[in-house]
Image (cartoon, helix red, strand yellow):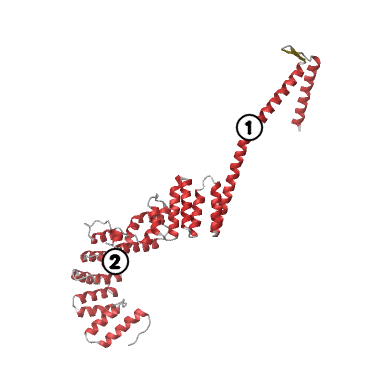
């Protein structure tokens, strides 16, 4: 309030001072030009001059404003078009999420006509057409997306691969992914395609990158790795996985390479080791592998495989198995293994004794049946039938009678 009063007083004082000057000496101004003249007081002249300057300035502002109307209209139109494109695109995406594919496609394409970067609209419209099982329209939208922005070619290609995966066209999916830069999404989609197409060797090459990005738990990863290893070993030599393989490398060497590339947990997995021993033609290699695995991870299932390898390493396996009794004196699986080894050696008394020990120490699968066979060979059919009954009970989980 005080400042306002002070300003008002200052204005009044200035006005009074100017009024005094005008009254005291109004001054004189004469302007003559081409025979015409203008006479006035200096103060009137100053006022007229200020008014003329003000009018001229207002005229210039009006002229500039009129000249800028077109630009303003253009900016306003662009803003309105962008807002409309955004609204149409958002509505189309909402309809996509709701599953209203036809309306989604309609709104997305309408939005693309107004959008400065319509690639996203065309890609999502293609997904809607693909979900409607309209491949012709899908490909049209994908082509329009590529034409709209050449720099988005990778995004369009990946979208095409995703759509192929959803309709389980795995080979087309894989073909699309070939030229793309590998990232988490590309790697995970490749993994699905390799697994669906059973391209296990290619999956194995991708494995380190897959492990880096996957959200599978450690146990799930181990299960999947075992599946890949077993499939690679079983498919070894097939045309699909080894059409360009080096013929100078034997199957045994390839099997050994596959096995050696496995993680430590898979190397001692019974199913993986069993597959390796089933497919390898080198009995000594199989025996050494099994012996090494049994030393790290004792397994009844592997003991049976160890017993049935063949004749070439029979004596060595018997010696090893008998030596293991010191560490595993009450292991039914080990006695069953010894029984099978003695049968191959034609030492029936030792085989029978080993099978009896196996039955008395847990009766693992097959022990009662093997003992029944030995008893039948000796003519003790009553006891043989009793052990066969035990074997059937173990298999079916219910009492059996003969």
Can I make out residue 113 in this image?
A: yes
The disc, 1 or 2, on the residue closer to the chain's N-terminal end is 1
Q: Position of residue 145 (x, y in %)?
A: 48, 49
The CA distance from mark 1 to mark 2 is 85 Å
Q: Vertically, is 35 above or below 198?
A: above
Q: Which mark is residue 54?
A: none
| Residue at the right extreme of this rendering | 23
Q: Nearer the viewer, mark 1 or mark 2?
A: 1
Q: Which residue is mark 2?
A: 275
Q: Position of residue 346 (x, y in %)?
A: 18, 77
Element at label 2: helix
Q: Which residue is mark 1?
A: 67
Mark 1 Cα-neighbour bin, 10 Å: few <14, some 14–19, many ≥20: few
Give the residue displayed 79% in from the left and 19% down from the top. 19
The image quadrant of residue 24 is top right
Q: Position of residue 11 (x, y in %)?
A: 76, 25
Left/right of residue 303 with respect to residue 45 in the rendered view: left
Give the residue displayed 32% in from the left and 84% down from the top. 389
The quarter of the rendered structure image containing the C terminus is: bottom left
| Residue at the top extreme of this rendering | 35
Query: As rendered, which of 339 and 208 lies closer to the eye?
Result: 208
Q: Vertically, is 9 above or below 38?
A: below
Can I make out residue 331 in this image?
A: no
């Amino acid at each position: 309030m005080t400042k306002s009063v002070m300003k008002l007083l200052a204005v009044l004082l200035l006005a009074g001072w100017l009024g005094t000057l005008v009254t005291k000496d109004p001054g004189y101004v004469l302007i003559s030009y081409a025979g015409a003249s203008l006479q006035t007081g200096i103060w009137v002249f100053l006022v007229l001059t200020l008014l003329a300057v003000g009018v001229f300035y207002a005229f210039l502002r009006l002229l500039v404003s009129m000249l800028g109307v077109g630009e303003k209209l253009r900016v306003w139109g662009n803003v309105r078009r962008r807002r409309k494109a955004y609204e149409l695109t958002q509505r189309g995406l909402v309809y996509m999420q709701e599953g209203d594919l036809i309306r989604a496609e309609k709104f997305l394409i309408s939005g693309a006509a107004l959008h400065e970067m319509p690639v996203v609209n065309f890609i999502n419209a293609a997904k809607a057409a693909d979900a409607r099982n309209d491949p012709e329209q899908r490909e049209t939208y994908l082509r329009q997306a590529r034409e709209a922005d050449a720099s988005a070619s990778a995004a369009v290609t990946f979208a095409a691969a995703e759509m192929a995966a959803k309709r389980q066209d795995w080979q087309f999916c894989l073909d699309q992914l070939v030229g793309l830069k590998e990232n988490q999404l590309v790697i995970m989609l490749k993994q699905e395609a390799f697994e669906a197409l059973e391209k296990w060797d290619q999956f194995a090459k991708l494995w380190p990158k897959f492990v880096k990005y996957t959200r599978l738990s450690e146990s799930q990863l181990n299960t999947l790795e075992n599946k890949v290893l077993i499939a690679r070993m079983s498919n070894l030599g097939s045309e699909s996985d080894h059409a360009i393989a080096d013929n100078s490398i034997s199957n045994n060497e390839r099997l050994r390479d596959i096995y050696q590339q496995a993680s430590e947990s898979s190397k001692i997995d019974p199913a993986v080791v069993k597959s390796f021993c089933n497919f390898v033609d080198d009995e000594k290699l199989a025996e050494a592998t099994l012996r090494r695995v049994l030393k790290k991870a004792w397994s009844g299932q592997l003991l049976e495989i160890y017993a049935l390898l063949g004749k070439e390493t029979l004596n060595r396996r018997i010696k090893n198995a008998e030596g293991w009794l010191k560490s595993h004196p009450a292991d039914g699986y080990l006695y069953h293994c010894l029984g099978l080894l003695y049968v191959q050696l034609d030492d029936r008394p030792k085989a029978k004794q080993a099978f009896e020990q196996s039955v008395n120490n847990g009766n693992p699968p097959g022990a009662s049946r093997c003992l029944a066979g030995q008893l039948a060979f000796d003519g003790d059919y009553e006891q043989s039938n009793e052990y066969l009954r035990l074997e059937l009970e173990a298999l079916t989980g219910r009492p059996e009678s003969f």
